[in-house]
Image: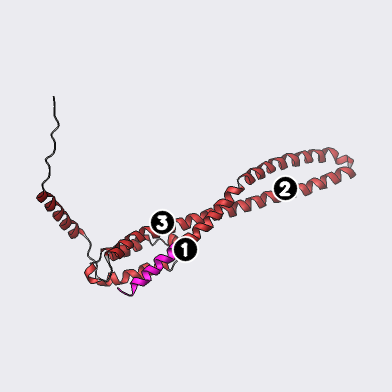
Amino acid sequence: MFQAIQPEEPIDEDIKTFFTSLESELSSSDTVFSKKEAKESPAKVDETLNMTPLNFYDSGRFSSLEKAFKILAGYDCSSTSLTIEQKNELLAMEESLKELADRAAKAVEDKSRLTKKKSMKLKITRKLDSNLIRYKEVESEMKHVEQKLATLLAERKGIFISSKEIKVELEALENEWDEYEANAKAAEEEERSVEAEWGKMKDFISSIKGRM
């Protein structure tokens, strides 16, 4: 019967040698940044945080911001006053900035959706108002002009059918109205949450910028 060959148990010396070699390889592959670049990086991040999350989302500056964070997090600790914890927080902040920008864009999109629905409802309501006005005019004309009765009756029928269709469309929209309002309210709360988190990161960058 075939028996699988079990891998040999690694010895402590082999483990240490492997990770020492790995550390050397990774260190040699890292990009070396100048002290000038390290000092300029907080200003670039601060400049980003002075933008609104939505403006940052639309600015297309993700790549330059990513480089600034990479410089800050990868620069030699011995040449700056940044602690390891602060560098770890910078790495986490990079992802948070992108996430907050995405959330801000999503919040605006959700709010604009309700605005579009309001415009649609207004347009539909105006159609109904117009049809109602014309309906009353037609009814009045029918009383005074018997010779136009056949034409007016046909027109009245058309208005009735059109109004029913539009009313069905309006009712369908109103059935979804609570959802649109809830989404818009949630979007406003999301915007406030995004702005609060954005402000915290801005304060953090400001606090370390002067120490670079």
**Residue 56 versus residue 140 in the image, above or below:** below
Q: Is residue 87 visible?
A: yes
- Residue range highlighted in magenta: 196-212
Magenta segment: does it hold 202?
yes
Relative to 23, say whether 76 is above or below: below
The residue drawn where x is 16% and y is 56% is 25
The x and y percentages for residue 45 are: 36, 67
Disc 3/disc 1 C-alpha distance (Å): 12 Å
* Label whose residue precedes the other's in the sequence (3 or 1): 3
In the image, taking residue 147 as reference, residue 99 lies left or right, namely left
Tell me the number on the disc at residue 128.
2
Q: Nearer the viewer, mark 3 or mark 1?
A: 1
Q: Residues within 10 Å of mark 1 (few under 14, many from 20)?
A: some
For disc 1, the marked residue is: 195
Q: Could you say which is closer to the camera, residue 150 or residue 143?
A: 143
Label 3, label 2: how far apart the Cα atoms are: 44 Å
Q: Is residue 103 left or right of residue 37?
A: right
> What quarter of the picture does the N terminus occupy?
top left
Residue 54 seen from this side: no
In front of the other: 167 or 155: 167
Foreground residue among 2 and 169: 2
Q: Nearer the viewer, mark 2 or mark 1?
A: 1
Crowd class of label 3 (few under 14; some 14 to 19; many from 20; radius 10 Å): some
Give the alpha-carbon distance from disc 2 to disc 1, as whole Å. 42 Å
Q: Is residue 25 magenta?
A: no
Residue 28 at what x, y percent from top left? Answer: 17, 60
Residue beneath disc 3: 99
The chief SS type of the magenta part is helix
**What's the residue type where badge 1 is placed?**
Glu
Q: Amino acid at mark 3?
A: Glu
